[in-house]
């Protein structure tokens, strides 16, 4: 019974993680469909890690269109965060 409860807990955690991943991918798709200047403005309101997480889910061509529209310091911070995330 204890093993079954532990298994159900793990399955619930996995379902929650899958739902979060799906939501992040959906948001990245929404940002990808925006005009680059609009996406850049909104992404700048997010924490660097959150913006980096969304950007890394987008096609490189879209990222290349968004980052130049940001102030250099913020674009660099987001890029650095993306590199750090890639190492995880």
Image (cartoon, rainbow, N blue to C red):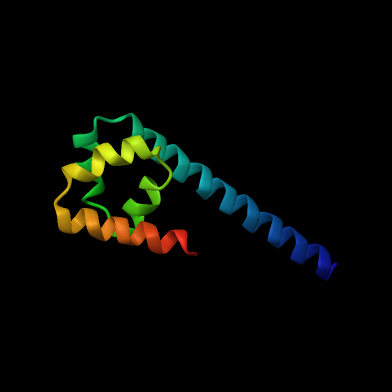
Residue 31: % across, % down: 33, 36
The reply to whether residue 47 is in sight is no
> Which residue shows up at 63% across the image and 50% down it?
15
Residue 81: % across, % down: 34, 61
Tell me the quarter of the picture where residue 48 sits: bottom left
> Which residue shows up at 74% across the image and 58% down it?
8
The reply to whether residue 30 is in sight is yes
Q: Which of the image's four quarters has the N terminus? A: bottom right
Q: Is residue 13 left or right of residue 26?
A: right
Number of labels in the image equals 0
Q: Is residue 88 left or right of residue 47?
A: right
Q: Residue furthest bottom?
A: 2
Front residue of 40/64: it is: 64
Front residue of 74/44: it is: 74
Q: Residue furthest left?
A: 71
Residue 71: % across, % down: 14, 51
Q: Is residue 24 left or right of residue 9?
A: left
Front residue of 73/28: it is: 73
> Which residue shows up at 43% across the image and 61% down it?
85
Residue 40: % across, % down: 22, 42
**Residue 54, above or below 48:** above
């Amino acid at each position: 019974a204890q093993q079954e409860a532990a298994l159900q807990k793990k399955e619930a955690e996995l379902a929650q993680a899958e739902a979060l991943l799906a939501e992040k991918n959906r948001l990245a798709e929404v940002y990808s469909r925006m005009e680059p200047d609009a996406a850049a403005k909104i992404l700048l309101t997010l924490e660097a890690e959150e913006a980096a997480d969304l950007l890394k889910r987008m096609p490189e061509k879209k990222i290349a269109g968004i980052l130049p529209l940001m102030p250099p310091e913020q674009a660099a911070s987001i890029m650095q965060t993306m590199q750090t995330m890639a190492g995880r």
